[in-house]
Image: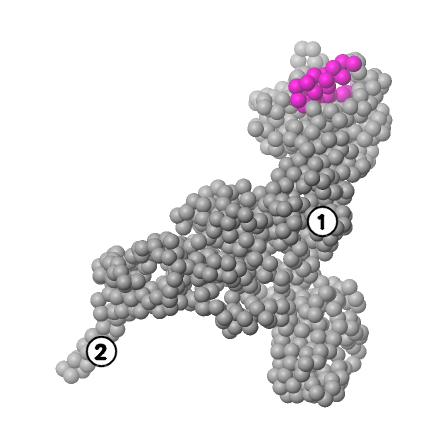
Amino acid sequence: MKKISIIGLLLCFTLAGSLQAQLRLPKLVSDGMVLQRGEDINIWGWADPGSAVTVKFKGKNYQATTEASGKWMVKLRKSKAGGPYEMEISSANEQIVLKDILIGDVWFCSGQSNMVHYLGRHSDRYTDEIAAATNPEIRQFLVPSNPEFQGPSEDLPKGEWKQANPENVLVFSVVGYFFAKNLYDKYKVPMGFINSSYGGTPIEAWISEGGFKDFPSELNRIAQNKDTAYVNRINREAQASRAVAEPQPEDQGLTASTPWHDPAYQPKNWHNINIPGYWEDQDIKDLNGTVWYRKVIDLPENMAGQAGKIHMGRIVDADAIYINGERVGGIGYQYPQRRYAFIEGILKAGENLITIRVTNYGGKGGFVPDKPYYLAAAGDTLDLKGTWQYKVGQVFHPQKNIKHGIAAQYQPATLYNGMVAPFINFPIRGILWYQGESNAGNPKAYEGLLKALISDWRAKWGEEELPFLYAQLPNFMEVNYTPSESGWAELRESQRKALSVPNTAMAVTLELGEWNDIHPGNKKPIGDRLAQAAQKLSYGEKDVVYSGPMYRSATVNQGQVTLSFDHIGSGLTSKDGEKLRWFALAGVDQQYYWASAEIKNNQVLVSTPKVPNPIYVRYAWMDNPQDINFYNEEGLPASPFEAQLIDELWYGKKAGVVLTYDDALDVHLDNAIPVLDSLGLKATFYITANASKGRMYDWKRVAQNGHELGNHTLYHPCLGGEGREWVIPENDLRNYNTQEIVREIEMTELYLRALDGKSSRTFAYTCGDTETSEGSFIPEIKDKFTALRGVDSQLNHIETMDFTDIKCYGLDGHSAEEMIQWAEKAREENALLVILFHGVGGGHSLNVSLENHRKFLEYLKTNEADYWVTTMEEAAQHCKDQKP
């Protein structure tokens, strides 16, 4: 009986403890929080179902009753800025008192690593700012990394509000802190920012499932990832593949009887190498593995025994650094700068040994140039750049059949679920976004994704025009002095285009990057520029200039392009007084050339004799447009951009013309090709594999010269019958079934691909016929080609163009004047003219003379300002892109 009583008593205590723990608040609603002024504020939490909850704040009581789920919420009346205040929350016998609450402005800061980067990581640059960062009215709520597959989370595993002081700001976002400080200094209103960011993550991870309504492939991934068994299976398979992989050899530097970092080790067979620099650029080729570096330095007496620090720039990929055998630091991945402090007693007078073990997993390994490399102690600094010695410790074997698992933070919606959803009940002033590096591999898609993110988050917070401010990607990587394509430039353009969404702003950061660091240190101007945008969009400062010049429009006159811009401020300027750099023009061929650019009447005039008929313009279209100088007078740089200057259908021309040649005749190679090439014109040659095999290498050269090799079947089958006695039974389409003609077309496709290496081309019906004994074969081939050419003598108009039956004019004894008339009619109607040649100077019963052929081609060349002469494949793809 006594035993039962004790058990019952323990049970009562347990239940009582359980009840006492029922009143709970989200991590965000806690001591030191900042509430948004001028808004009704939601305060929520959890308690026993059906229980009454009271919230007392600023002399008012707010009541709520918990739902069946245990959740409750009250709405506080809007308040002016002020504080600090206390808030009492009670239910039954429980009470929570929150202290030091401020009312001011709350900004939600998100993105990847450049938003993550905290002041402590840049303490050398911001030493004075950190020391002066004593402001209890600037606060950060740091959100822990928390990806979730299954759906939106209600709360976080941890998190707390921290006020700015020299210790706390070491983990404040650099961009977020300087943004908040800028606004606080101007308005003297408490500033809180929620730092919800995660390094290396794509934008897709931050969009909710509902935000992907226009992205079915992402919705499929989200549904798949909710299947825990599927995710676990993929991850188990990845782990198993690594477990059975061939083990890597041991690192001799660690396994030697005397490790190589030990001062007692006697080096043998070490070789010279320079720091900084990559070992692939010096004495070691294509090595993935570990390389050990060592250097003996002499130190004066005053540095002996002193605490100090060693800076070793950036190292690709991982490192471990030893001084006199003592490990003083190491990082497992390439991006952070190596800045390690060491304690007293490590340094000694005279000779000191520094040993560095560098591990590289792919690409170039070693020490990134143009970074600081030095040792400092007792107020003295010793430069560590120069000649070191190296020895290879480990060479990695290539790993085969390694499977990759599913990392939650890279999957769509997971970071929204775990790091955004817990905040959507909490009113905010606006959003800061700094992300894009992880999407540079697919930059064109970013515009749509960024617009989807903006729309999604505004819907979640219930504000259609919630201010959304974001940073454009800065300059990065090596400078390319030749106009070329650039994924980073393309992504910057997607970011610029997203400004079409109302109440958004973009901070141009083009001169704030570092060529050798994806995490540039000069982040204060980014925070300041975003704050300037906030002053305009959110605080109503009408006169503030918050952006550098943004491309608006262009006109073209006799080869000179005149560009107009928005956000010119007090005027456009060359910051260094030199000619504007990094403008490029291109013609219809989209081959870009650097162009001369000058400012006149707050417009930019651009031209180059290499592009007499400009169609496209670009500015700063590079990974790293070094030393940009195009600014407004307020000191803000212009955004990069690209634009099509002329909106007419045919790249600024009045008509499109396609010259096609059928049946792979010798006269095409001998008579047509020389004229085309001499005039710089491109055409399409429809190849029957059987007829072309005798001069296969000649046709290969035709493709190499830019002409299209089109598909015209293996044997040129046509419908036989009355009037077509020349069609032999084996080539009579009436004796084919659909499978046979499709197989013949597919075999020709393999043959043509062997000649030109291309997977995209057009098809021409033989004799214009489209049926076998089983009916039309068009449905079976229409998706295999960009377009299918027929034989009807008509012009093609973009509005009515049928890509399964492109019309063309067939020639048989026609004069050059007749062909010119067709071209002029196409010019009048802004249409596409396609011409079909068989014999050129003989070679076929359907023929045009050499003289008429040449005269028509010369007409096209003379009037190239009016006619875009191209291949069937290029014309069809262009029309598809332009078709309403």
Q: Considering the numbered disc 1 on the image, is that residue within a helix, a strand or a loop?
A: strand
Say whether disc 2 or disc 1 marks the residue closer to the N-terminus. 2
Residue 749 visible to the viewer: no
The amino acid type, in three-letter code, at marker 1 is Ser
Q: Single out the residue that lies furthest toward the top.
A: 722
Q: Quadrant of the N terminus?
A: bottom left
| Number of numbered callouts drawn | 2
Indicate the position of residue 299 as horizontal and vertical percent values: 74, 84
Q: Nearer the viewer, mark 2 or mark 1?
A: 1
The residue under the point 48% across, 63% down is 145
Residue 654, placed above or below residue 143 = above
Q: Is residue 70 magenta?
A: no
Question: Could you classify mark 1 by the number of other residues whose Cα lies within 10 Å: few (under 14), some (14-19), or many (20 or more)?
Answer: some
Q: What is the magenta range?
A: 817-843
Q: Which residue is mark 1?
A: 574
The percent position of residue 181, horizontal first and vertical second, equals 51, 62
Q: Which residue is mark 2?
A: 10
- Residue under the image location 42 percent in, 67 percent down: 160
Q: Amino acid at mark 2?
A: Leu
